[in-house]
């Protein structure tokens, strides 16, 4: 009887841990949508009409995400987002279906208000797209590969959203390649519709 009581005590005393789940609507941040599209480079110039044919520009991959913030305070001081874009890592110049890997990018917002319909985005450069299979390989993530966007506060994941509703652990099994996904403020879209997005945390000289 005493042994049973100790087991019962341990079961009650062991703390429980909660983990972010896709579709969880109870946290301070909820990512409601993730989508990816190939888009041309924005053109900031105004040119006169000409008969010279315009060469189509190579495409970037644009990853857009929508989220809602519901914090205890009116604003979230610092809110980090991380994106994982699944690609096929070619083993040779003609190999477009090599081993899967993840391109990883991050951005940090500040002064995020408690509002619905907040937005963020990431971008992948055309040269990077060419390296990992070309535009055909990036043309339809809904059918081919997955994308995850996760939200973090103080380094702890509080929310995530996958473009496909797959196994929640799919990210952990793939090799991660950093530095190839650009946050919006490092892309040609940095000043496009700037009021639509929360402000980005500035980088110190050491960064």
Image (cartoon, rainbow, N blue to C red):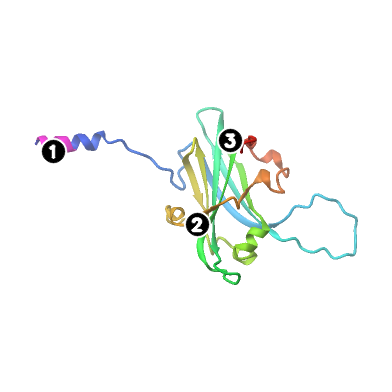
Task: Classify residue 127 by image quadrant.
Answer: bottom right
Mark 1 or mark 2: whose residue is earlier in sequence: 1
- Reading the image, the residue beneath label 3 is 115
Instruction: Kindly state the secondary structure of the residue where label 2 is placed.
Output: loop
Classify mark 2: residues with Cα within 10 Å, few (<14), some (14-19) or many (20+): some
Disc 3 versus disc 2: distance between alpha carbons? 25 Å
Q: Is residue 5 magenta?
A: yes
From the image, state whether disc 3 or disc 2 is nearer to you.
Answer: 2
User: On residue 4, which mark appears?
Assistant: 1
Disc 1 versus disc 3: distance between alpha carbons? 50 Å
From the image, state whether disc 1 or disc 2 is nearer to you.
Answer: 1
Instruction: Kindly state the secondary structure of the residue where label 1 is placed.
Output: helix
Mark 3 or mark 2: whose residue is earlier in sequence: 3
| Residue that sits furthest to the left in the current view | 1
Residue in the image at 69% along x and 57% along y: 39
Residue in the image at 90% along x and 61% along y: 50
User: On residue 101, which mark appears?
Assistant: none
Viewer-nearest residue: 29 or 6: 6
- Reading the image, the residue beneath label 2 is 164
Q: In this view, does 8 lie above or below 41?
A: above
Span of residues in magenta: 2-7
């Amino acid at each position: 009887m005493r042994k049973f009581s100790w087991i019962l005590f341990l079961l009650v005393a062991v703390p429980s841990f909660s983990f972010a789940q896709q579709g969880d609507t109870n946290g301070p941040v909820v990512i409601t949508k993730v989508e990816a599209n190939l888009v041309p480079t924005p053109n900031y110039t105004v040119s006169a009409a000409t008969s010279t044919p315009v060469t189509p520009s190579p495409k970037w991959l644009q990853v857009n995400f929508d989220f809602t913030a519901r914090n205890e305070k009116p604003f979230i001081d610092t809110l980090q987002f991380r994106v994982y874009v699944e690609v096929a890592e070619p083993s040779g110049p003609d190999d477009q279906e090599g081993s899967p890997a993840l391109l990883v990018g991050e951005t940090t917002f500040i002064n995020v208000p408690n509002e619905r319909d907040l937005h963020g985005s990431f971008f992948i450069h055309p040269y990077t797209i060419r390296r990992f299979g070309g535009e055909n390989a990036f043309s339809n993530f809904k059918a081919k590969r997955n994308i995850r966007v996760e939200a973090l506060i103080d380094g702890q994941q509080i929310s995530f959203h996958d473009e496909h509703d797959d196994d929640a652990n799919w990210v952990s099994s793939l090799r991660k390649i950093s530095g190839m996904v650009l946050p919006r403020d490092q892309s040609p879209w940095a000043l496009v519709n700037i009021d639509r997005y929360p402000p980005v945390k500035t980088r110190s000289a050491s960064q």
